[in-house]
Image (tube, grey):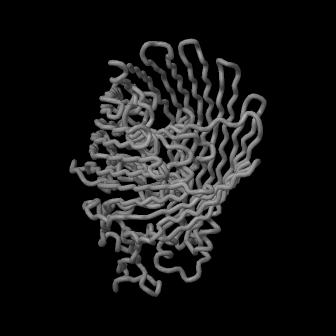
Amino acid sequence: VAVKEKSKESPISLRTISLQEIEKTPGSNRDVSKAVQNLPGVAAGAVNRNDLIVRGGGPSENVFFLDDVEIPIINHFATQGASGGAVGILNPDFVRQVDFLSGAFPSNRGGALSSVMNIKQKEGSRDKMHFKGSIGASDLALTFDLPIKDNNLLFSYRRSYLQFLFTALGLPFLPSYDDIQFRYKWNINQKNEILFLGLAAFDRSELNLTIDNPDESQQYLLNTLPDYNQLSYTVGAVYKHYNENSIDMVVLSRNMLRNAFEKFPDNNKNLPKLFDYSSVEAENKLRYEKRYTTLPFELSFGANARYSKYTNNSNRTININNVLIEDKYNSLIDLFSYGLFVQTGDAYFKERLKLGMGARFDGNTYSNLMSNPLVQFSPRISASYLFNEHISINANVGHYTKEPSYTSMGYKDSNDVFVNRETLKYIHVNHYVLGLEFNAKAKIKASVEGFYKQYYNYPITLNEGISLASKGNDFGAVGDEPLISDGKGRAYGIEALFTANDIKKFNIYAVFTYFVSEFTDIKGKYVSSSWDNRFILNLTASRKFKYDWLVSARWRLIGGSPYTPIDEYVSSQRQIWDVRNQPYLDYTKFNTLRLGNYHQLDIRVDKEFAWKNFDITLYLDIQNVYNYKAESEPIYTNLNTDGNPNLTPDNQAYILRKISTTTGTILPTFGLIVYF
């Protein structure tokens, strides 16, 4: 992990990840999001998921840009209304580097509350064609690098084989996915260029109904998991014009997500569905930026506009205060969003002091509560002072806003009314960050950062009385329910980072984060969020040996997650249980329990072979080497040990039984990468 030369706008909370780190970090499986989870202040929402939990914020608080084009969906099996998922869509063969900001966001990156990820793709070859093929933990990838006159086209296709692996392992669900990605650079002349890019994913998951005599855990998943289909894409064009004293940039893009899942009683498709969810959201975006290059100080400004359309056709039964209610609606919204931004910066005292300031104004046409951009005014200021060539102090204070999700804005009640239109507001957060950094030439670097985040206008669910900030780490959708923007939140902590390069041929990377994450419930009481793990420790070491061998290891220790006990009385009622075949949580005791700490060791060995015209890399990646069994939230069944319904004598309620569950297994992966 590199620490870049400090910019005036973001002198703090910025880390850079190279392609080598994405490809060779143990346990990352060449996945950008999993590599980012190794950074200070970053955790996963759940084991084996790609949610980014940054400094105690939820998975919906992050934004992603690919060569200046915003890409809302970067994961397969994405959670609608959040940003997490199961596996990354981005092919690492396209990636040059990733700049990750957990604070001090530049003003041209709107909608971020917890992080901004700027992904920069590599330039393709202009002299000869290249091919790269890889077989990894979950998919086969083919990448083509094609010179076209003075320009270049990068294209890739990936297909998963998880469904075959899961069938062989006897797992109760069978996911599969495909994705494509392209990048075409057109150098018109010395002053003008256009970049075209795109990525698309098609995901589906069906139940494995061929399992003979499923055990209790398998049967529980068969009873609760839906069939799932998802399609997403982003396409965009970036035009740049280079003037003598400035650079003009115009970005035009479109993205779409189609999300559908359904569930049948006893998985019998001849019976009426237990629930049926079908939704589409699409965005068309235009952004203009101008950056001056010859002024004695830095100056940039711009504007953005977006037209969005969202539809939802859903039918489900929900439990409200022990009463079953049919929640059926057909929704359509379209709206315009708009923004203005400016950023400036300068250096003083022989470049020792760097100051940066910026501001944004945002609004949309959804309601009067969100239309005035002055209400969403978001200023920020950063400072960095270099005491000497080794030590610097850095600080940032910023105010950031985010529009509620389309699932929230587009929700209708049973009376066909957009009940959230009169209550939803932009979510606001204040950031306060202070850090000290030490650089000993190029070999040793260390830093300490403290942060404090204050949230307000966070949506609270009316049915459950909890903050929406604690949702979003499961598949499907989040936010499609009655809400009120009365919630507050706070997240604060400290991060320590130490890196040592080429110390007796070892590279060492150590990160420790301690943090608290709390949000108010409907009564105004602060309670632990679902991401309140309290501490994260990542230790990574690697060493190169003779003959192109590389051995690396990573050990992680993460504090236990809060969780909520079930409401045993409500859950045991036969009519209520049969709606979804799983218990209902007791939200009056939300996140009052906590799981045990979790730790895992991952090891990876790479061997490279280089010939004149092609290269081959073989690797072995072993996750959870010592087979640690982590504690997981308890699950309950209404069946007895013989697999029959366990009813009370009056047949009106089930006698629920807890199933012992743990997560974690040794997961070896043999990989092959061929390049020529």
Tell how many labels.
0
Q: Which residue is rendered at x = 50% and y = 58% of the image?
A: 552
Quadrant of the rendered image containing residue 571: bottom left
Q: Residue at x 56, y 23 (%)?
A: 249
Which residue is at the front of the view, 315 or 398? 398
Q: Nearer the viewer, residue 346 or 227?
A: 346
- Image location of residue 394, percent across then percent down: 32, 32
- Name the spot of residue 39 as percent of width and height, x first: 42, 48
Identify the residue at image location x=42%, y=84%.
640
Q: Of residues 263 and 41, which is closer to you in this image?
A: 41
State the image coordinates of residue 364 (x, y, percent, origin top left).
44, 30
Residue 502 sits above or below residue 657 on the image:
above
**Residue 383 visible in the snapshot:** yes
Vertical placement of residue 240 versus 256, above or below: above
Residue 208 image position (x, y, % from top left) = 59, 71
Q: Residue at x 69, y 40 (%)?
A: 154
Q: Is residue 502 left or right of residue 537?
A: right
Q: Is residue 138 visible?
A: no
From what the image shows, is residue 634 above or below residue 445?
below
